[in-house]
């Protein structure tokens, strides 16, 4: 069955994949493939955005693997590292979601052998690159400089990872790129990888399959700005005033030179309050942004199209909200988008909240006692993984939601400080009365017990997740009556 | 047969009914009536707990403390029934009556527990109450 290779290039690529993982955890269906292979490309090995996405991917994979193959439900989408797609342990590449740059930690100048060049070539290099470009160390990425990125990234096409990718690429597999157009790594990496994959004279294995592969791309236009350092301050920073100019230049290049993308998605927003200016390393850990969540939807949309629909003329998509509002709720999304994610996210949110705050009190309830859930939660590592996924302050689901609520344009589909399930969803509340408590803890236990009656699994983790899938579905359909 | 069974059961714990002139009333009427009521009421309360409260109605009374309350309620009823039977059949009240009531209450605890074990599997909300054993589902 087909695979989808998602190349997340640069910091934006990592952040969009983070949102994609949250959607997959909630059970949002990705059609026409049975495995997602995320490949993060970022030379900044210490990048905070990248590292927390990698931790999230690893945790997701543990949870998915424990639950096994299923067609729907929380964590049902299968993800795999590049090295494990061969499935026979024959891989020579590192088992990681991240492309291994092998620790390039020298200045760009040394990387291209500037000092060994003759004087004419040096002059040409000086024309194309600023002194900062030449002197900056590459281990923090390309600091928003695509001219540097395009040189360094050109080398990865001959790497063992890319050859392994190509040799395991099969007809029917698809490729999707996620990158920003205004940065360094993403803006350089996307066209470069695309060019190499679609090159009919490519020396990569399976070149014909790669050439013919259905390919999509999410091009993220500027959506944030960065603080400018004080005048005269000698600090290392990315100048976000150049984002728009760089985006326009890159769009112009794409218009004339980008061949072989079957569906291109564009997304952007007016930048709001500037973010802290951290050009790289661990300090580059930006809060999650609505644009990244919406960008992740492009992958789901791309996979919704059948092979035939994508094989025709190239498709171009832009995203729009129903209203230009600061606090985006599900009702502000188009019906198609809402249908894809709203119920799943509500169910997952209910699950996360109930699991975190109420399950420990339910040790006597049949659904919990039947599988000794209290003991399993104390002793089984998989429950620690689940708690990490939901509540890690660094990369967890709750932290992600909180971050999405901190921007000027927020994702406010849930009232995050609301403990009452009846009032948790912003655009739909449950009417309660003397005899109708709505979605109370008692109602939850009742549904969980009912659900667990039909579950034959004796393994506490599987049984609990399945019970929550059924219970949250019934509560959303019958009590919340969300549509 | 029922008469013999219940008379034998109660007299096993209580000895010959007292006062002696009411022995036959106990053996022919009070023991069988009390025994049958013990069976029917215990079964009814177990069914009420597992199938009405915790299957049809899903009241949320699934915790062991709720089961324990039903157990005690059954014991209180089981204590009251012999006294009512004695009084209702014109039999003189004696310390034997209260010992009989006490034994009946203790038997009700055993019966309630046994019926619970036999019937709890059919409950959706409380099949693990008061404990999961012997089912694993």
Image (spheres, rainbow, N blue to C red):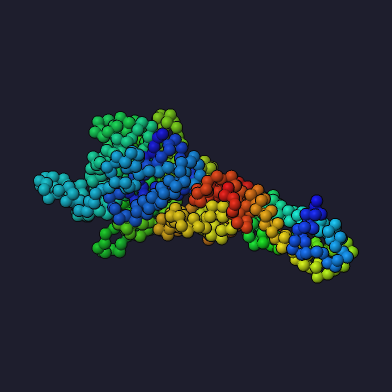
| Residue at x 70%, y 54% (from the top left corner) | B46
| Residue at x 85%, y 57% (from the top left corner) | B28
| Residue at x 59%, y 52% (from the top left corner) | B134
Judging depth in this view, the residue of A357 and A32 nearest the camera is: A357
Q: Is residue A392 visible?
A: yes
Judging depth in this view, the residue of A274 and B72 nearest the camera is: B72
**Number of marks in picture:** 0
Residue A421, picture quadrant:
bottom right
Residue at the far left in the pictured view: A118
Q: Is residue A471 visible?
A: no
Residue B37's place in the image compared with A32, above or below, is below
In-image side of A212 versus A383 (left or right): left
| Residue at x 32%, y 36% (from the top left corner) | A168
Judging depth in this view, the residue of B79 and A33 nearest the camera is: B79
In-image side of A70 versus B131 (left or right): left
Q: Position of residue A392 (x, y in %)?
A: 43, 58
In-image side of A318 versus B30 (left or right): left
Residue at the far bottom in the pictured view: B95
Residue B44's place in the image compared with A205, above or below, is below
Q: Position of residue A124 (x, y in %)?
A: 16, 45
Q: Position of residue A470 (x, y in %)?
A: 57, 46
Residue A188, picture quadrant:
top left
Residue A109's place in the image compared with A174, above or below, is below
Q: Position of residue A138 (x, y in %)?
A: 23, 52
């Amino acid at each position: 069955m087909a695979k989808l290779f998602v190349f997340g290039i640069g910091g934006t690529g990592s952040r969009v994949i983070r949102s994609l993982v949250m959607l997959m955890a909630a059970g949002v269906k990705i059609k026409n493939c049975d495995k997602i292979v995320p490949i993060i490309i970022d030379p900044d090995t210490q990048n905070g955005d990248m590292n927390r996405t990698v931790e999230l991917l690893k945790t997701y994979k543990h949870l998915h693997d424990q639950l096994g193959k299923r067609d729907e439900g929380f964590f049902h989408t299968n993800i795999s590292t590049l090295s494990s797609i061969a499935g026979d342990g024959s891989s020579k590449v590192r088992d990681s979601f991240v492309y291994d740059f092998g620790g390039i930690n020298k200045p760009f100048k040394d990387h291209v052998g500037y000092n060994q060049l003759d004087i004419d070539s040096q002059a040409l290099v000086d024309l194309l690159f600023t002194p900062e470009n030449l002197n900056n160390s590459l281990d923090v990425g390309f600091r928003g400089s695509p001219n540097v990125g395009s040189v360094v990234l050109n080398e990865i096409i001959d790497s063992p990872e890319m050859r392994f990718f190509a040799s395991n690429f099969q007809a029917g597999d698809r490729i999707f790129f996620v990158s920003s157009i205004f940065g360094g790594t993403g803006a350089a990496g996307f066209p470069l990888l695309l060019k190499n994959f679609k090159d009919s004279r490519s020396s990569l294995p399976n070149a014909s399959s790669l050439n013919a592969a259905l390919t999509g791309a999410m091009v993220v236009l500027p959506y944030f700005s960065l603080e400018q350092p004080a005048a005269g301050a000698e600090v290392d920073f990315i100048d976000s005033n150049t984002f728009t100019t760089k985006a326009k230049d890159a769009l112009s290049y794409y218009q004339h030179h980008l061949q072989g993308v079957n569906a291109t998605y564009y997304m952007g927003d007016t930048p709001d309050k500037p973010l802290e200016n951290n050009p790289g390393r661990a300090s580059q850990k930006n809060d999650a942004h609505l644009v990244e969540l919406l960008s992740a939807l492009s992958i789901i949309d791309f996979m919704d199209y059948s092979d035939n629909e994508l094989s025709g003329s190239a498709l171009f998509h832009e995203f729009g909200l129903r209203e230009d509002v600061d606090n985006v709720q599900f009702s502000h999304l188009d019906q198609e988008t809402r249908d894809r994610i709203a119920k799943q996210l509500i169910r997952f949110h209910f699950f996360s909240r109930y699991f975190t705050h109420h399950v420990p009190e339910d040790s006597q309830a049949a659904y919990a006692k039947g599988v000794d859930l209290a003991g399993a939660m104390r002793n089984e590592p998989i429950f620690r993984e689940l708690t990490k996924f939901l509540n890690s302050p660094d990369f967890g689901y709750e932290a992600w939601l909180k971050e999405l609520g901190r921007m000027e344009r927020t994702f406010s589909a849930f009232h995050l400080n609301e403990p009452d399930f009846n009032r948790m969803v912003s655009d739909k509340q449950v009417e309660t009365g003397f005899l109708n408590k709505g979605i109370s803890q008692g109602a939850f236990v009742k549904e969980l017990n009912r659900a667990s009656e039909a579950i034959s699994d004796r393994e506490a983790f599987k049984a609990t997740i399945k019970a929550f899938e059924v219970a949250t579905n019934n509560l959303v359909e019958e009590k919340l009556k969300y549509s | 047969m029922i008469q013999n069974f219940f008379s034998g059961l109660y007299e096993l714990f209580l000895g010959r009914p007292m006062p002696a002139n009411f022995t036959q009333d106990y053996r022919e009427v009070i023991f069988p009536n009390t025994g049958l009521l013990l069976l029917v009421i215990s079964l009814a309360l177990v069914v009420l707990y597992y199938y009405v409260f915790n299957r049809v109605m899903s009241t949320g009374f699934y915790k062991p403390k709720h089961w324990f309350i039903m157990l005690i309620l059954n014991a209180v009823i089981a204590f009251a029934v012999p006294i009512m039977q004695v009084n209702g059949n014109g039999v003189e009240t004696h310390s034997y009556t209260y010992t009989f009531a006490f034994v009946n209450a203790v038997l009700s605890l055993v019966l309630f527990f046994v019926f619970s074990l036999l019937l709890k599997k059919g409950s959706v909300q409380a099949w693990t109450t008061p404990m999961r054993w012997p089912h694993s589902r």
